[in-house]
Amino acid sequence: MKFVEEIVVDEFLPTFRSLLAEELRERGHTQSEVADLLGISQSAVSKYVHGDVARNERLLEDDRVRGLVARLGEGLTEGTMRPVQALVEAEIVIRQLEQGDVLAQMHQAEVPDLAEYGPFDVHDADSDVRVAEQVLASVRRGLAVVENAADFAGAIPAVGTNLVECLPDADGIEDVVAVPGRIIDVKGRPEIPAEPEFGMSEHVAGILLTAREHGSDARATLNLAYGPDIVAGFEDAGYSTVEFDAEADADAAIAAALADDPDADVLYQTGGFGIEAVAYVLGPDAPTVAGMARDALR
């Protein structure tokens, strides 16, 4: 595990400081003055100036880094820029280089798994990698609720259950996180077979995506064995429930069920020929729907 901040410390700062130390020395500053301006020791300045510090060739050749060094060298020498202003300008350039740029690329080289997310800004709360990891973490938290819910195993359908959550702009199963396979009842305890992944649980994920297509804002769902007592438990807990036809086309049936109540908390069907009766809990995230199920089953 390597953070982009380590790339900044290990690669950017030695290169940037050595260039700036050289620039300031060339502009007539003593080593002591350079040390004061940069907030480092004179011995560190000496190492920078004499080439005793390894520098990153890619950053050495970057016009933005060299332009920053020239601006700071001139401003600090002429007195038109205070050290704190120089710090702010340097921080701005660092942030730019982290936004899918050279520092982000260097980070991906150190952490190859990041490449699957393409160029990204690790500090951007909406970047694909952060959003995806947040959804995976959310499903893990929801699964912890499921594992610790005393009565949950008894509500698992014969076909098994799953807990799923999708990305904010999901448009297919590849944008949905779920447990590979199904959660099953093993000696009265929910058995979770594997860590959650994207692209799993086609059926339960499909119910969620279909509900979203027809007006639901839900980003997560969990399926339970249907029973009048379970539906009553949700209703007693203050959740709204709507029924859909298990034997009709799923898209049309869910659309009809949500037509009058797109914000329904529970979708359920009472079964049909060869079709097990199931209820689907809908909510904003995996821990919430797991908690809803736990509360309704008490």
Image (spheres, grey):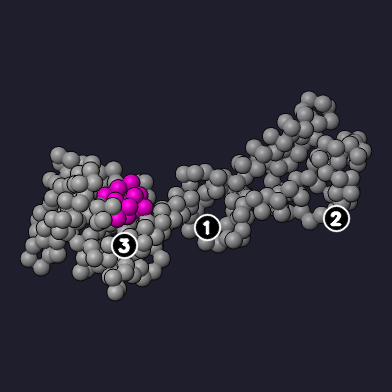
Q: Residue at x 76, y 50 (%)?
A: 14
Q: Which residue position is annotated with label 3?
A: 150
Q: Residue at x 49, y 44 (%)?
A: 125
Q: Which residue position is annotated with label 1?
A: 114
Name the element at disc 3. Answer: loop
Mark 3: which amino acid?
Ala
| Boundaries of the magenta span | 282-294
Structural crowding at the residue carrying mark 1, measured as other residues with C-alpha within 10 Å and reported as few (<14), some (14–19) or many (≥20): some
Vertical comparison of 295 with 189: above or below: above
* Residue most extreme to the top: 80
Q: CA distance from mark 1 to mark 3?
A: 38 Å
The answer to whether residue 54 is left or right of residue 181 is right
Q: Which residue position is annotated with label 2?
A: 52
Closer-to-camera residue (23/131) = 131
Along the polypeptide, which appears first: circle 1 or circle 2? 2
Structural crowding at the residue carrying mark 2, measured as other residues with C-alpha within 10 Å and reported as few (<14), some (14–19) or many (≥20): few
x and y, in percent, of residue 242 in the image:
15, 47
> Is residue 286 found inside the magenta-colored segment of the image?
yes
Vertical comparison of 242 with 227: above or below: above
Magenta stretch, main secondary structure, is helix
Q: Residue at x 81, y 47 (%)?
A: 18
The answer to whether residue 52 is left or right of residue 187 is right
Q: Are marks 1 and 2 in contact (CB under 8 Å)?
A: no
* Residue most extreme to the left: 273
Tell me the quadrant of the picture where the C terminus can be found: bottom left
Closer-to-camera residue (131/292) = 292
x and y, in percent, of residue 8 in the image:
68, 50
The answer to whether residue 43 is left or right of residue 149 is right
Vertical comparison of 186 with 44: above or below: below
